[in-house]
Image (tube, rainbow, N blue to C red):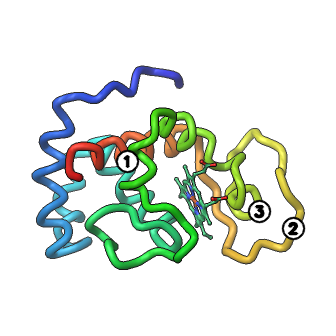
Amino acid sequence: MDGPLKSSPKQLSMKKLLRPVAATGLLFLATESAKTDTAVEGFELSVRYCSRCHVIGDFNRLGGIGNSPSFNWMVKSDDWRERFMTFYMRRPHPVFARVPGYPLWSNSDPYYPPFEVTLEEIEAITEYAGTLQVTQ
Ligand code: HEC
């Protein structure tokens, strides 16, 4: 669960990987994901759950919504890992992000379709976000 998420040689391969992804998108990813790299899984999850609001890298450099910080920007802060691992407790996410085993954090009407992520998936997303530190 709290295994080390140290930066690793994976960063290099992700760097190579993400360039073509920007060009050819998910089609490329579909074949590449056979590698079952945690960071690749994290990328797919970020596309599915986060990219509507956040710029998550080259995939949607011009996307996201104005008041959401980009992943590229967030990973520059010293405590970014902590922030990613606990994003579901941080505004505005408690309204729409659910983690199994955690109580409902908010009963407000979700203005965004609610989704469920596991802690493992959040780790994968965090691992992916870490790869942005070297591509920027
Ligand atoms: C509906 C839009 C929306 C979605 C979907 C969304 N976010 Fe956010 N997120 C935001 C906004 C807006 C902020 C800025 C909040 C603020 O500055 O108060 C934010 C801030 C953050 C922060 C910084 C929080 C802090 O307190 O430092 C992290 C980390 C984050 N998001 C991660 C994620 C991840 C990971 C996902 C996908 C699993 C995701 N977000 C999905 C809107 C969204």
Disc 2 residue lies near ligand 1 with CB under 8 A: no
The response on whether ligand 1 sits within 8 Å of label 1 is yes
SS type, badge 1: helix
Q: Residue at x 87, y 67 (%)?
A: 108
Give the class, few, some or many, for how many residues have Cα within 10 Å of label 3's Cα (few <14, many ≥20).
many
Q: CA distance from mark 1 to mark 3?
A: 22 Å
Give the percent coordinates (x, y) of residue 52: 50, 74
Where's ligand 1: which quadrant?
bottom right
Q: Residue at x 31, y 62 (%)?
A: 57
Q: Residues within 10 Å of mark 1 (few under 14, many from 20)?
A: many
Whole-percent x, y for residue 42 in the image: 39, 50
Whether label 3 lies within 8 Å of ligand 1 gets the answer no
Q: Are marks 1 and 3 in contact (CB under 8 Å)?
A: no
**Residue 1 horizontal side relative to residue 100, left or right:** left
In three-dimensional space, the C-alpha distance between marks 3 and 2, rounded to whole angstroms, equals 6 Å
Residue located 53% across and 43% down the image: 84
Marking on residue 108: 2
Dot 3 and dot 2 residues touching (CB under 8 Å): yes
For disc 2, the neighbor class at 10 Å (few under 14, some 14 to 19, many from 20) is: few
Q: Earlier in the sequence, mark 2 or mark 1?
A: 2
Q: Closer to the camera, 12 or 83?
A: 83
Q: Residue 129: which disc?
A: 1
Residue denoted by label 3: 95
